[in-house]
Amino acid sequence: MKYIALLVIVLTGLGGCTEPNKKVVVATAANVQYVMQELKEEFEKESDTEVEMVVSSSGKLTAQIREGAPFDVFVSADTQYPNEIHKNGGSDVAPRVYARGTLVLWTLDSTAIDLSINRLADKSIRKVALANPRTAPYGEAAVQAMEKAGIYEQVKDKLVYGESIAQTSQYIASGAADAGFTAMSVVLSPEMKGKGHWVKVDSSAYQPIEQAAVLLRHSEDSFKAQPSRDFFEFLFSGKAKAIFRKYGYSVE
Amino acid sequence: MDPEPLWLTLRLATLTTLILFVIALPMAYWLAYSRFKGRSVVEAIIGMPLVLPPSVLGFYLLLAFSPSRAFGQWLESTLGLRLVFSFPGLVVASIIYSLPFMIYPLQAGLQSLPASLREASYTLGKSAWTTFFKVLLPNSKSAILTALVLTFAHTVGEFGVVLMIGGNIPGVTKVASVAIYNEVEALNYDAANQYALVLFVVTFLILSIIYTINNRLLRVRHPA
């Protein structure tokens, strides 16, 4: 019995109450995770603040933030979710657009040199992956692009929906889907670089994917206020912009 | 609320339960009565879905079913079947996922029957086949019911595996649990609530009915 009690204490972490160090928890939309890794390293280099990433889809993160998740900054894949949080009092500062995303069409089949949206109607392509257009901006953009190309009706029955851009990319990268739409930041990431074949989707074929970040109220009355604000500002710095560009985002 | 995901869940759970029952019966019989080398290994494999996170199962199934890998390629070239992102794929995945929930109760039920039952049947000249269907099974009604219900309920509650290999296609792989997840993600809590409430009530009713029947069966066998 004594040992059980001891075990419980150790496992619940009551045993080791460590000093709180400066740490910012960043809720990160799936498409931003690779670039965020680099931003995090850069920020940690120039300040003595630790950055912790929580990666998920923007919709899920928003639901969690609304229910009081302990995040300090939310880096979303769109502007709608951060606005929603701001409107509901989850943040006192209006969200700011940090970058614009680029949609790409990607396939694992490296022989598909003439990959294009119109090819998706081909019989050889049986499954096309995209992020859920109801919740993910890249999915919405993909639908717009297919509609613009006039092939949406033909491709509709081939569509499979990832719950986030991460799952969509996984469907494509594992070859489970023959082709699919994802963010350029994914195909440029160190993990995926050189895998298969991808092309940019004509940016006039879809509405700009504006991605906004928001400083969350959670950070405000804690000792994390300053580092959180610093990180938020860092997202709009010249250094950060250069990193965003490297991953295929466009920034002003 | 769109009733399609609920209907799909019902179809998936019913099909999985029926197919699994047919597969599990001989396996349970074999496990209950034969002693052989490597038995622990077989039992461990059957029990794996019980402890493995659904994400592990889903991940491996996604790779296995993918047409760019050996098994998926073989399925497609010989049977013309693509299991990833399809309803048959979900059925296959559910059968694997719910396997222990069907086999364990059946095996335990058969093992709990007194050996004299079988021996009496054999001495009366009945074959193993007749003994199984005419003597053993009718005396295992409670175990059969438990196995069927657990399998059905477990398949209704399946989420992680479906999310990994389903692709969220309306009317094909978008089952109720995934629909709830979608609605929460879209911040559409009302719709999520409606689906959740239906699932909640339906599963509660099924379990209540089954326990009532089961208690009655037990009372018949062991009258107070």
Image (cartoon, coloured by chain):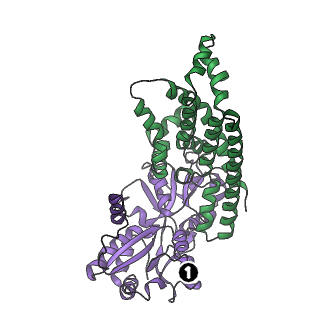
Chain colours: A purple, B green
Identify the image quadrant of the N terminus of chain A. Answer: bottom left
To which chain does the residue with label 1 belong?
A: A
Quadrant of the image occupied by residue A151: bottom right
Q: Nearer the viewer, residue A48 or A247?
A: A48
Q: Nearer the viewer, residue B127 or B71?
A: B127
A140 over B221 or under it: above or below? below
Q: Is residue A134 left or right of residue A243?
A: right
Q: Position of residue B134 (x, y in %)?
A: 67, 21
Residue B164 placement (x, y as % from top left): 51, 52
Residue B82 shows in the view? no
The residue drawn where x is 35% and y is 85% is A227
Amino acid type at mark 1: Ile
* Residue A24 falls left or right of residue B124: left
Q: Position of residue A167 (x, y in %)?
A: 49, 58
Task: Specify whether residue B175 is in view.
Answer: yes
Query: Which is nearer the eye, A74 or A249?
Result: A74
Write down the quadrant of residue A248 in the picture. bottom left
Q: Residue at x 40, y 76 (%)?
A: A25
**Disc 1: which residue:** A85
Residue A147 lies left or right of residue A185; in this view the side is right
